[in-house]
Image: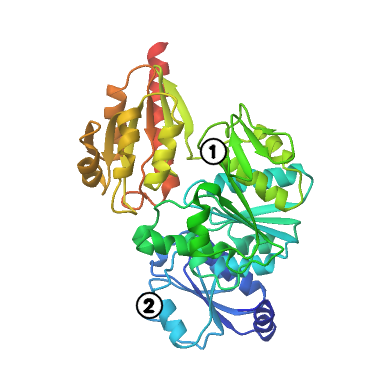
């Protein structure tokens, strides 16, 4: 759908259907209603489960149809529809709309077109997207440019379009779910941080997942830039060769921007130091190199990344230390919803680990973590729907305890941990079997730990 066509619809006051009443759907409804369209939002969940979204939709002047049959579409006619990322491409709603020749637009694509940014940096990857978006935005801001950031990790792209006048740079986190629905999205700088098994419950195979991820640069032109990991460059090019300029990053000598020994090295210039920062390690160092490539592509001195890294504070629920009790460190990595993210957390651990893992799995196997478990984990405390699967794959390399609930796992791990160890919540799974989202799961972990810390402090008096 072209930008010109969207504006024609807006001017005529036509009708738009928004699929999903989550954050993205609400933002799209608000943006379209502000443009004068008649907007109907449809969601499978009943009204009582939608919380504040109900009031926000109604206040915007849109209509909400909650508890809607997932196999039936509201009567139109609809000029076009906007799909939230949680609505898969094979949904009966989307297939039904396309059968009626109703264009379906991804929310992030609508927001991107309307934000009016001078330049757009889009960041995707299996793990680490939110951290990289924050680092790039901080670096651009440090260099003196006006920047707004959001997308998959929030705020939604349509929310940014509503709330911000035209910035110099728009930095968007883009998930595979969002890319699945994009048809014209074209960032000036496309950064693919990594591709590891993730969301296979939706995409089916790693090959299909990789194909969706490479859509990030599918519509780029020769004067745009694609930033890709050097160690995956060959296989990514084989799926979809960029037509744009390519910069590679990573720890290998072949990378255009290489992380090595606490610094980012780039041909023809002095190294950019990230020593002593959150990025001074083998897991996050390559992300800093990717950020340097992104800002260089914007024409900004990559040293801005070093300055931003020195001021960086980790995002919540991402290997975030909560408290140390009796010499045992408690770390919240609830955002780790894939095996690859769990493995990254283990590689970063500087102490022996007692691991709390489990939830609703997105992938069929967690065997890839076995070597790291054997090397770094004293015991695994398993929760949620994946407990039996994890135990079957891990019990020969690490003691596994089926605990069911997070509080039970925390209690047992705390009783068994000794001074100098770490209790790490890094589930490797989604939270939807027991919690609304990974934030609620991480909050529950932190509340339990803080209560235990308070009890320990009282006993010490």
**Please, what secondary structure does the residue beneath circle 1 have?**
loop
- Residue at point 46%, 68% (across, down): 20
What percent of the width, then of the height, locates residue 264?
64, 36
**Please, what secondary structure does the residue beneath circle 2 have?**
helix
In this view, 322 is above or below 50: above
Q: Disc number at residue 405? A: none
Q: Are marks 1 and 2 in contact (CB under 8 Å)?
A: no
What percent of the width, then of the height, locates residue 90?
39, 73
Residue 74 seen in this snapshot: no
What percent of the width, then of the height, locates residue 155?
59, 55
In this view, 232 is above or below 329: below
As drawn, the residue found furthest toward the top would be 461
Tell me the quadrant of the picture where the N terminus can be found. bottom right
Q: Which of 421 and 195 is in front in this view?
A: 195
Residue 270 seen in this snapshot: yes
Q: Dot 2, crowdedness within 10 Å: few (<14), some or many (≥20)?
A: some
Tell me the quadrant of the picture where the C terminus can be found. top left
Q: Nearer the viewer, residue 414 or 346?
A: 346
- Residue at point 72%, 47% (across, down): 140
The reply, left or right, for residue 20 in relation to residue 413 is: right
Q: Nearer the viewer, residue 18 or 85?
A: 85
> First in sequence: mark 1 or mark 2?
2
What percent of the width, then of the height, locates residue 31?
63, 69
Q: Quadrant of residue 442?
A: top left
Give the labeled residue for mark 2: 92
The reply, left or right, for residue 138 in relation to residue 61 is: right
| Image color mode | rainbow
Q: Which of 99 and 437 is in front in this view?
A: 99
In this view, 272 is above or below 25: above
| Badge nearest the viewer, 1 or 2 | 1
Give the labeled residue for mark 1: 284
Q: Dot 1, crowdedness within 10 Å: few (<14), some or many (≥20)?
A: some
């Amino acid at each position: 759908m072209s930008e010109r066509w969207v504006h024609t619809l807006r001017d005529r006051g036509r009708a738009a259907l928004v699929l999903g009443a989550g954050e993205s759907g609400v933002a799209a409804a608000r943006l379209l209603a502000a443009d004068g369209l008649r907007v109907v939002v449809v969601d499978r969940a009943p009204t009582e489960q939608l919380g504040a979204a109900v009031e926000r939709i109604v206040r915007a002047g849109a209509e909400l149809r909650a508890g809607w049959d997932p196999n039936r579409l509201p009567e139109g006619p609809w000029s076009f529809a906007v799909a939230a990322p949680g609505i898969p491409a094979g949904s009966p709603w989307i297939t039904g709309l396309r059968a009626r020749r109703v264009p379906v637009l991804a929310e992030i694509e609508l927001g991107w077109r309307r934000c009016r940014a001078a330049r757009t940096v889009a960041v995707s990857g299996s793990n680490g997207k939110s951290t990289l978006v924050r680092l790039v935005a901080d670096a651009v801001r440090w260099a003196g440019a006006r920047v707004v950031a959001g997308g998959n990790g929030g705020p939604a792209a349509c929310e940014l379009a509503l709330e911000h006048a035209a910035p110099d740079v728009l930095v968007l986190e883009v998930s595979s779910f969002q890319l699945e629905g994009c048809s014209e999205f074209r960032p000036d700088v496309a950064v693919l941080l990594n591709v590891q098994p993730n969301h296979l419950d939706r995409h089916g195979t790693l090959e299909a997942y990789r194909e969706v991820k490479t859509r990030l640069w599918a519509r780029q032109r020769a004067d745009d830039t694609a930033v890709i990991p050097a160690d995956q460059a060959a296989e990514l090019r084989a799926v979809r060769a960029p037509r744009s300029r390519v910069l590679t990053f990573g720890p290998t000598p072949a990378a255009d921007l290489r992380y090595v020994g606490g610094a980012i090295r780039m041909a023809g210039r002095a190294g950019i130091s990230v020593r002593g920062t959150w990025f001074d390690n083998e897991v996050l160092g390559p992300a800093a190199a990717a950020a340097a490539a992104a800002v260089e592509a914007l024409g900004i001195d990559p040293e801005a990344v070093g300055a931003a890294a020195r001021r960086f504070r980790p995002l919540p629920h991402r290997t975030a230390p909560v408290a140390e009790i009796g010499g045992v460190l408690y770390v919240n990595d609830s955002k780790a919803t894939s095996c690859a993210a769990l493995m990254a957390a283990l590689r970063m651990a500087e102490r022996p680990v007692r691991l709390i893992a489990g939830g609703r799995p997105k992938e069929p196997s967690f065997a890839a973590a076995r070597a790291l478990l054997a090397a770094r984990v004293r015991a695994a405390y398993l929760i949620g729907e994946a407990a039996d699967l994890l135990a079957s794959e891990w019990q020969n390399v690490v003691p596994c305890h089926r605990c069911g609930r997070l509080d039970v796992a925390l209690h047992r791990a705390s009783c068994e941990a000794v001074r100098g160890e770490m209790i790490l919540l890094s589930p490797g799974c989604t939270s939807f079997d027991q919690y609304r989202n990974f934030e609620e799961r991480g909050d529950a972990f932190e509340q339990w730990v803080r209560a235990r810390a308070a009890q320990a402090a009282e006993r010490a008096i």
